[in-house]
Image (cartoon, grey):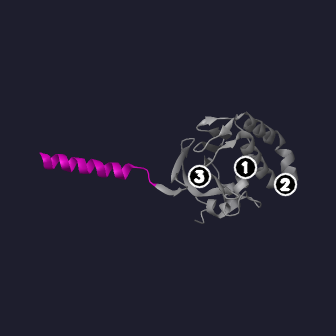
Amino acid sequence: MRFKLASLAAAATLGLALWTPAHALELAGVKVEDSVKVAGKDLVLNGAGIRTKVVFKVYVVSLYMAEKKTTTPEVLAVPGPKRFKLVMLRDLSGEEFGQAFLTGINKNLEKDEKTKFVNQLLKLGETFETIEGLKKGDVVTGDWTPGTGTVIAVNGKPVVSPLPDVLFYNAILRIWLGDAPAEASLKPQLLGAS
């Protein structure tokens, strides 16, 4: 009887080990998932890295899509849902975060794109003004879902009504993947180089 119980316990433990989700990597103590589900679709990790400013680690960013891509044009062209995920590594005010976010978008937009996206940029800026701040460990996600649009959420709670233009979602991704990325080392990491 003891042997049977021990065997069952071992099998159960092995079963749990097999069903425990594996993590692709751990960055600055943040476990980065291999995959996520957005709008009922399974997305895979394209890449992840740490955003630093001067010497401070600001957040871990990860990018998820239906299939892995290694260039910015390929990432922006992938159809279907996408997600970027930020896990904060330090406290920031809503104003600080919003300013950095909008600066990153604007640095990677052409003049005609700025004109086209002015309303969405204003809406996003106003949203960040309403967020009191982000604390270490807070999670910011940006999901693109066809038919819905871009939804930005903080700790799972949407903070802005959906922004409908996929090109605007791509403008957000260019914060990290554009010609003037927020941090040069992040671009190859999000494109799966490491």
For label 1, the residue is 172
In the displayed structure, 117 sits above or below 188; it is above
Q: Position of residue 81 (x, y in %)?
A: 62, 47
**Circle nearer the N terminus (1, 2):** 2
How many residues crowd mark 1 within 10 Å: few (<14), some (14–19), many (20+)?
many
Q: What secondary structure characterizes most of the magenta part?
A: helix
- Give the magenta-colored segment's residue range: 1-22
Q: CA distance from mark 3 to mark 1?
A: 14 Å
Q: Which residue appears farthest toward the bottom when viewing the image?
A: 193
Where does residue 57 sit, x and y in percent of width and height? 63, 54
Provide the secondary structure element on which disc 2 rests. Answer: loop
* Left or right of 17, for residue 93: right
Q: Amino acid at mark 2?
A: Glu
| Amino acid type at mark 1 | Ile
Residue at disc 3, secondary structure: strand
Q: From where the camera sits, is residue 111 visible? A: yes
Which three-letter amino acid code belongs to the residue tagged 3? Tyr
Q: Is residue 101 above or below residue 155?
A: below
Mark carried by residue 64: 3
